[in-house]
Image (cartoon, rainbow, N blue to C red):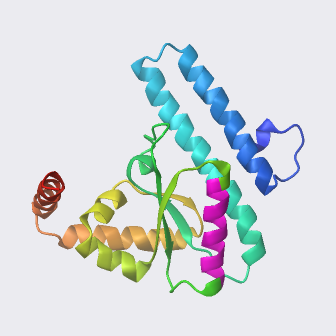
Amino acid sequence: MALKTIKKDKSPLKINQIGSLFHAKLSLLTAEFLKSGRNYQSGLKFQDKYSDLIDKTICALSTECFKSTKTAPAPIIVAVGGYGRRELAPYSDIDIAFVQEQPFNRQTKKFIEMLNSHFWSAGLKISASARTLKDCEAAMDEDISFLTGLMEKRLIWGPKSTYQKLDKAFRQHIKKTPPGFFISAKLSERDVRHHK
């Protein structure tokens, strides 16, 4: 169910309405899950519907916020990690990446700051990073956590052409990476984490 279908009319949603409708829909989802007896399949169904609700909320907020910064280039918003694979638990961080081809100008930074503020007001626990495509390519070499997150990425909002360039860069990185490198890097990451 789209956010707009909760309303009786077809008028566009305002920023404060988006947050209210998100909470109303989340309450319905939670009640449906609790009524189901909490079996395995109902848990998977909840994760999928909750991820879908987050998608719609992020899209609605992004579209409304971007109206006031139309001179800015639109970054893409990419879901990564558990959110990217649509396996979002109720209290998990919602991991996203803002990605843009060119360096972020003042207007685009303002858009991201405004959007993060509205995410917070709506009750979305967002964990976000902002990178240019060039930064993403460098991070693929240097940041194994970022690379892992990209394995389960999805485009949520923004120009599809930018997402396709990100996906192409990711695929080229994987293709040039020696076999076994990723597993070795993940094991090293685990060892560092366990020694803390």
Q: Residue at x 43, y 51 (%)?
A: 84
Q: Is residue 112 left or right of residue 7?
A: left
Residue 138 placed where, x, y %?
A: 30, 79
Q: How many marks?
A: 0
Magenta stretch holds residue 109: yes
Tell me which secondary structure the magenta stretch mostly adopts. Answer: helix
Identify which residue, 42 or 24, lies in the foreground: 24
Looking at the figure, which quarter contains the N terminus?
top right
Considering only vertical position in the picture, is 188 above or below 129? above
Q: Where, by quadrant of the figure, is residue 25 drawn?
A: top right
Considering only vertical position in the picture, is 24 above or below 34? below
Q: Is residue 43 left or right of residue 175?
A: right
Q: Residue at x 88, y 37 (%)?
A: 8
Q: Is residue 136 left or right of residue 73?
A: left
Q: Residue furthest front?
A: 196
| Magenta part of the chain | 107-120
Q: Is residue 73 visible?
A: no
Residue 119 placed where, x, y %?
A: 62, 56
Q: Is residue 84 visible?
A: yes
Magenta stretch holds residue 11: no
Considering only vertical position in the picture, is 7 above or below 178? above
Residue 141 placed where, x, y %?
A: 24, 75
Looking at the figure, which quarter contains the C terminus?
bottom left
Q: Residue at x 68, y 42 (%)?
A: 22
Q: Residue at x 17, y 59 (%)?
A: 189
